[in-house]
Amino acid sequence: MSNTFGKLFTLTTFGESHGEAVGGVVDGMPAGIEIDLDFIQSELDRRRPGQSNITTSRNEADRVELLSGVFEGRSTGCPIGFVVRNTNQHSSDYDNLRQLLRPSHADFTYQAKYGIRDHRGGGRSSARVTISRVVAGALAKLALRRKGISIQAYTSQVGSVALSGTYSDYDLSLAEQNVVRCPDPEKAAEMEQLIMQVKSEGDTIGGVVTCVVRGCPVGIGEPEADKLHAALGGAMLSINAAKGFEYGEGFAGVAARGSEQNDVFCRLASGSISTLTNHSGGIQGGISNGNDIYFRVAFKPVATLLREQHTVTVDGEDALVTARGRHDPCVVPRAVPVVEAMAAITLLDHCLMSRLSF
């Protein structure tokens, strides 16, 4: 089983949804970076359950403990070990699932591959394991700050309720001022209402997270095997419930002509070269071109429904399943910090591969 992300900046994760703890080991963190524990905790707080009435009611503090790699408030360059303890498991909620295969979950594939599975909340395949990614992403963000690189994600669509225009049409700082993390207050209210409606019906709904990277210098990424957009796509599609990735104009761009899509080069007053437009999404030929990098990640409706569904047992016998316990009716608002974290991990790894000094 592969549990490590990255090449130079790496994260190895461990833990299960209903185990003692979730944690990880970060290796390759540049030395001398100021480690702001309050910031790391604030990132975890954005992901934690029980934030609002549109998320799971599981009550976890998700307090992070750094075990190594930090001395007098700065990274030493040694591996940074960390742990977040599970304190509010209701494992009995999953007793009825021991012999059942939940529709659209990893139950069947995990059982088929390994011959054993933890039926309590999905075990290793649970989205709770993304805690480790958020901690590592916060550490990566602290390093990227030194180079003026910032990452901002937000909810741009829930079900059929979607923002119009592009990210530049919105004040992205408003995203954290509502429970759905949408920078348009009116659309945010519509999204919240839709999620609450779906929740009341025992159903779930999907959506889209848009992410913007500002300040990335020219030259990050490789032209062939390690294309930056391919690495970002792989990172995003590794997130639980992610079903699609596009950067720049993405799929919408196929309806345009090349004459409409090409980013024409120009010389700025400063003497540097840039482009008049940014249809490419800040990446050309697999390498960053200095413009904003922007991309979208589609998330499916959560597979756990609080309503009866047909399924089979592990022996293939017909059965009915009704999930119990505490579950998100829409994963998108809590996925926003996870998208940012995976973007930060990927970018710092590629910055180090491009020999950018910190």
Image: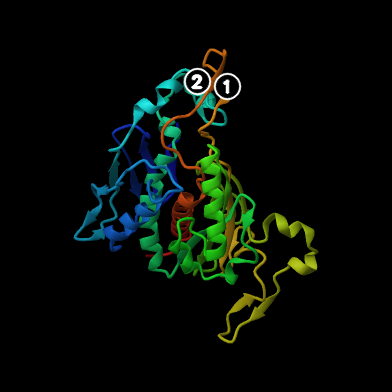
Q: Which mark is residue 100?
A: 2
Which quadrant: the N terminus? top left
| Residue 120 drawn at (x, y percent) | 40, 28
Do residues under tags 1 and 2 come within 8 Å of each other at their CB atoms? yes
Q: Which mark is residue 354?
A: none
Which quadrant: the C terminus? bottom left
Q: Choose the circle earlier in sequence order: 1 or 2.
A: 2
Q: Extreme bottom residue here?
A: 269
Splitting the image into 4 quarters, where does residue 198 fall? top right
| Residue 48 drawn at (x, y percent) | 37, 48
Give amino acid for label 1: Thr
**Residue occupying the point 39% across, 60% down:** 141
Circle 2 residues within 10 Å: few <14, some 14–19, many ≥20: many
Q: Nearer the viewer, residue 113 or 192?
A: 192
Callout 1: SS: strand
**Residue occupying the point 59% across, 71% down:** 169
Mark-to-mark CA distance, 1 and 2:
7 Å
**Residue occupying the point 58% across, 84% down:** 271
Q: Which residue is mark 1?
A: 311
Q: Is residue 184 visible?
A: no
Position of 171 relative to 249 (above/below): below
Q: Extreme left residue here?
A: 72
| Residue 326 drawn at (x, y percent) | 41, 37
Position of 1 relative to 129 (above/below): above
Q: Is residue 34 left or right of residue 342?
A: left
